[in-house]
Amino acid sequence: MKGLATEAVKRSIDFIFDELQAHKIILITRDYNERSCKLAERLNFVKEGHFRESNIDSEKRWGLYYYGLLKPEYEKLKEGI
């Protein structure tokens, strides 16, 4: 089952850019979720922002990382450049 999330996100990216003709995909994850952060970075998303301690749950504060991938960046990756 290893790599299942990566494959699912790759296919989603292809669909969003190729079929829906989006210009940008934004991925948002909690800042303590290391696996999601690594997945975003492995798929060449660029970290665009960090909303520090922007949320609270059970008296614990946590933030959000915002990642972005532009269609021109995606196209370069598909070409292997």
Image (cartoon, grey):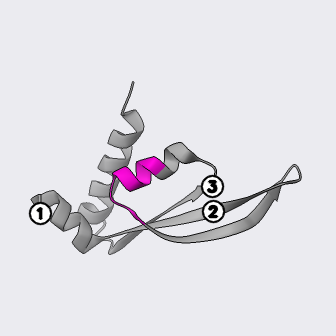
Task: Give SS at disc 2.
Answer: strand
Task: Give SS at disc 3.
Answer: strand
Q: Please name the amino acid that badge 1 sits on.
A: Ile
Q: Is residue 38 left or right of residue 71?
A: right
Estimate the spatial distance between the alpha carbons at disc 1 and disc 3, rounded to whole Å.
Answer: 31 Å
Residue furthest to the right in view is 59
Q: Please name the amino acid that badge 2 sits on.
A: Leu
Q: Quadrant of residue 31?
A: bottom right
The residue singled out by tag 2 in the image is 64
The reply to whether callout 2 and callout 3 are in contact (CB within 8 Å) is yes
The residue singled out by tag 1 in the image is 81
Q: Counting residues from the N terminus, which is met first, the one under dot 2 or under dot 1?
A: 2
Residue 30, label in figure:
3
Write the residue at 19% across / 60% down. 77
Q: Is residue 3 left or right of residue 49?
A: left
Residue range in magenta is 38-46
